[in-house]
Image (tube, helix red, strand yellow):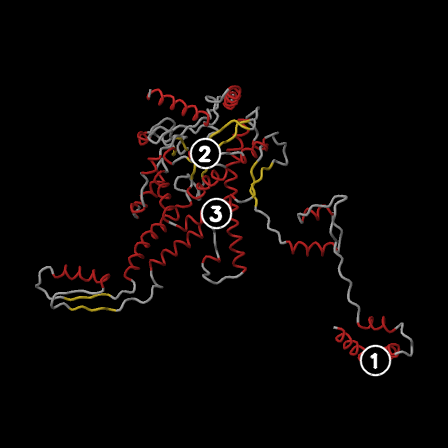
Amino acid sequence: MRKIDSRAARCRAKRRSEKNRPATPQNAPGRFKRVLAQGLAEAAGPNGRAPLDKILLPHARNRWALPRAAGMTPDAIGDIMAEALTSTSPRREQELYDVMFETWPRLVKNTTDLADAAIGLDWSVMEPEEIDPIPGAAELARKARLGMRPDPLADGQGWEGTSRGLLQGFFRGIAVHEIDWEYRAGGLMPRQTRAVPTWHYGWRRGGPGSSIAAQSSVPPQPEDGRLVLYRDAWSRQGTEFPPDKFLVAVRKVCAGHPSGGALLRSLAWWWAAQSFSAGWLLSFAQIFGQPFRWATYKLGQPNIKEQLAALLEAMGAAGFGVFPEGTTLEFREAAKSGQDNPQKAVIDAGDRVCDLLLLGQTLTSDVGDSGSLALGQEHSRVRGDRVDSAAAWLAAIYNEQLVPSLAALNIPGGPHDFARLPYFEPSRKEVRDAKAMIERDVAFLGAAPVKKDWLYERHDIPAPEPGDEVIGPIAAPPPAPSPLALLQATSASAPPNSRDGLLWRAITRMPAETRAYILEQVRRLGE
């Protein structure tokens, strides 16, 4: 009876898991199964395009075996940098960059700031202006960007996560993401992407189909240097990347092959210098301010040197000591300032180099606590140029790889002309000075008329419809009358022999300077 119950429980659990499983041609129910299978079959196309099922299944245990910072000695880093120029695999170089990210806060801060700013731009889908666009392609690109729904339990990445992962290639030289497709919104759309570990790809050398073990005996081939895929971590046979399944981000800062052309390669030496300087700085901090302890002893006493060394070491924490007879102990003055510490200078220099290389800071990187508005504007301009460069590089990956795949999988009649495809265009968010805009518009309205609709749109104010209750325009207050006008208004209508009439005749007959003085006094009395 217990076995029957357990079997029933397993069946119920299996049904629940199948119910929550994402839709594929194998598990989709009824009519949707046929539609989805047909969509995936059409995606393969008459040219026999590769299937869109999941290809790579990375294992977590490969991540657990990564090296630690303690093993990255200067000799080891030099070997890794040299190997990156000739090796078929970028694995060791990328593992070095992993350790750098784990142990260098300034590197994490700069790369995160640059990626956040690039992703935070306004990303628009544009269509070509000088040529007829492909109907429906722009809508596909918008749906692909806005409709991704990743699975966080499987390390799936949506649009932002994919962009952030691909931007790692901007710094590391290469990054690869696999696309998981699904049928929704009437077509095949990316559901998520997954980062591909570095042991799943490498550079081909020795011709198609040749193994790494036989490379030394194979003559150079035209396919040498081409990036190939290893479907599991132990594979020694590289295959071509299937179309429409991967986003490959490659960036090199120098001419030649991408191997060894990563931006972070220039920071490896500074990271090593900082790593050793940090340990030395902690050792220096432990003894900073303590007097130097100097002891002399008489020869002939067995083990006296080792005993004195142990006693002197214990004095640093105990504050007292017991020494054999005949020992002379001296306390010499310690250093009182740490401003000229070389370890701190090396760490600060490494951080400045990281700032200059990644963010492009110029004036503000060395001004210390001083600064001005001009320095801040210069820093913002240079940093903005780096953000625009990273965003344009990322947009090129989407425009050259993702958008053509969307068109090939969803729009018949391919292959399509790339010039007619839509494209992603990042742009900076416009920051407007409302006060300056109003002052400019008021000055211009005094010289020429402008369209009312344009003026409302410029200030993001809806134009009133007929029948709407409105406020304004608020009329300007009339100018205050002059004291002479006030006096004239009150005295001109007075009888000639009255006090006001006589005063008015006397004021009008005065010299101009005297009249102006009296009127000023009248104005002050009125205040």
Residue annotated with mark 2 = 151
Residue 409 picture location, percent across and down: 53, 26
520 lies above or below 148: below
195 lies above or below 47: below
**Front in this rendered view, residue 475 or 239:** 475
Q: Measure the alpha-carbon separation of dots 1 and 3.
A: 75 Å
Kindly check if marks 2 and 3 are in contact, taking CB atoms under 8 A apart as contact: no
419 lies above or below 26: below
Task: Tell me, for residue 511, which label it has, or none.
Answer: 1
| Amino acid type, label 2 | Asp
Kindly check if marks 2 and 1 are in contact, taking CB atoms under 8 A apart as contact: no
Residue 387 picture location, percent across and down: 51, 47
Q: Residue at x 84, y 80 (%)?
A: 510
| Amino acid type, label 3 | Leu
Image quadrant where one finds the C terminus:
bottom right
Image quadrant where one finds the N terminus:
top left
**Front in this rendered view, residue 38 or 505:** 505
Q: Nearer the viewer, mark 2 or mark 3?
A: 2
Per the image, label 1 sits on a secondary structure element best described as loop
Residue 373 picture location, percent across and down: 54, 60
**Extreme residue in the front direction:** 1
The mark nearer the N terminus, 1 or 3, is: 3
Answer left or right for 377 relative to 57: right
Q: Residue at x 52, y 49 (%)?
A: 385
Crowd band around label 1 with a 10 angstrom C-alpha radius: few (<14), some (14–19), many (20+): few
Residue 160 picture location, percent across and down: 49, 40
Residue annotated with mark 3 = 114
Q: Measure the alpha-carbon separation of dots 2 and 1.
A: 93 Å
Crowd band around label 3 with a 10 angstrom C-alpha radius: few (<14), some (14–19), many (20+): many
The mark nearer the N terminus, 2 or 1, is: 2
- Place residue 126 in its image quadrant: top right
